Amino acid sequence: MRTVWTRSLLAVVVTAVWVAALWGCSSSSGSGAGPTGDSGAGGDARATDGAATDASTHDTGAVEESGHEASAGETGASDGGTGSGEAAAADGAVVLDGGWVLVWSDEFDSGTAPDPSKWIDTSLNTTSSGPGWGVEYDEPAASTVSSGNLVITATQGADGGITSGAIDSKGKFQQTYGRFEARMKAPPGAGVWPAFWLMGDTNGEGWPTCGEIDIVEIVGSAPKNAYGTVHSGNTTDPSQNTSTGGSYTSTGPDLSADFHVYAVEWSASSVAFYVDDNLYETVTPQTMTSGELWAFDHDFYILFDLALGGSWAGPPNAATFPATMLVDYVRVYQKP
C-alpha cells in the first residue's frame, strides 16, 4: 500500500504505483515486478477499479458482528499483559486457546519510534501503478510509538500533498505458518485505507508469485467492513495477480469507532481470517479462484501501512486529516 495523494487526481493516477512493484517480495526496497493487469480485490494488489466488489466475490458468507465490543475477542490489553484466551506455560511461554504458543510480538510500549530491531521504515515515494491504487509518500516521522501504540499518521500539507507511513519486518522477522494477529483501531474518514498484511519472502521472486496475505484492509468507502484476501499468481500467467478473499461486516458502529483484533490462522492447507475471534473466511487450495496458485508455503514478513485514495477507498477530503491508525500490539504464534 502506498500513500501520497498528490496535488491533483490526475497526478495521483499518473504517479500511483503498486507498492509491490517497488518492494517486490524480497525486500523493502526491492525491484520485484509489480502487477500487470490485476484481477484481484483489496489486498496489496490494492484495488483496481471495482475492487470493492471483487473483494466479496469469493466470500463464503460475510459474517456480521454479534454485539462485539472492543474487548471481545481481544488477546491482550494496551499494557501488554496476558489477556483472555491466553495462559502462561510452565516454561513461561504464552499459550493461546487452541495450543498456539507466542513466538514473537511487539507491544509498542517503549520508545518513541518503532523498534529498529523489529521494523524497517518503508518508503514507496517513487512507485507508480495502474488506475485505482491509492498512493502514499512515506517518511519515518509519520510512524511513531506513543501511549502503548504504534501510531501511523497521514497529514496533508499546505500544498495539498499527503505524507503517511509504512513499516515492515523484512529481514527482522519472517515465519512460515502460524497465527498472526494485531489489535488495531482504523482511522475514520473519506479515502482512508489502513492495512495489516504479510508479504512472501522468496529471495528475490517477484510479486505476485511470492504470495501476499492481507490480514485486514479497511476502506473509507465501506467503514463497517473488514476485508481479508490472499494474492498470488495464476497457472496461465504467474505474473498475473489473482486473488481470493472475503469480508466481515459490523452490525454496530463503523470499525473505526474502537479497537478490534484482526488475525489469520495459516497452515499448509488453509488461511483462515478472523475479526475479534469471529471466523469469516477460510481459503484453501480447493476454494481459491480458478487458476490461482497456492503460494503460501514459505516465510512471510509483516507490514503495516496507511494509504489514502484510489478507486476502492475513494478520494480523501479536508476533513479526513489528520488520519491516524493505531496498533496496540502485534503477536505471532506457532503450534509446537
Image (cartoon, rainbow, N blue to C red):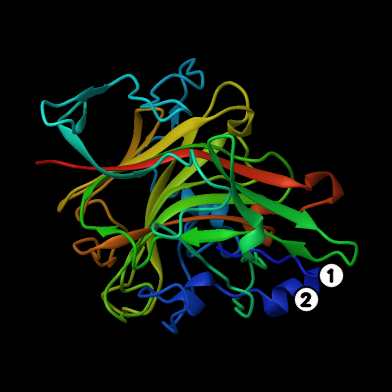
SS label for mark 1: loop
Tell me where residue 258 sits by quadrant. Answer: top right
Residue 250 location in percent, x, y?
A: 53, 27
Q: Is residue 208 left or right of residue 123?
A: left
Q: Can residue 109 be seen in this view?
A: yes
SS under mark 2: helix
- Residue at (21, 52) in percent of width and height: 177
Q: In which quarter of the image is the C terminus?
A: top left
* Residue 170 rendering spot, x and y as whole percentages: 37, 66
Q: What residue does disc 1 label?
A: 7
Q: Residue at coordinates 67% horizontally, 44% vertically from top-left?
A: 324
Residue, x 69% and y 78% (percent of image)? 15
Kind of residue sitting beneath label 2: Ala
Density class for disc 2 (Cα within 10 Å; few <14, some 14-19, many ≥20) is few
Q: Where is residue 141 in the image (x, y as percent from the top left)?
A: 66, 59
Q: Tell me how far mark 2 sits from mark 1, CA to CA.
A: 7 Å
Question: Considering depth in this image, is 129 or 144 the residue closer to the camera?
Answer: 144
User: Where is mark 2, residue-wise?
Assistant: 11
Q: Which amino acid does label 1 sit on?
A: Arg
Q: How crowded is mark 1: few (under 14 residues within 10 Å), some or many (20 or more)?
A: few
Residue 221 visible here: no
Nearer to us in this view, 89 or 274:
89
310 over 111 or under it: above or below = below
Quadrant for the N terminus in the image: bottom right
Q: In this view, does 174 lie above or below 210?
A: above
Specify whether 32 is left or right of 113: left
Pinpoint residue 10: horizontal percent, then vertical percent.
79, 74
Task: State the residue lying farthest toward the right.
Answer: 158
Q: Residue 75 carries which label?
A: none
Q: Is residue 92 left or right of residue 321?
A: left
Looking at the image, do the residues carrying marks 2 and 1 touch, with CB atoms under 8 Å apart? Answer: yes
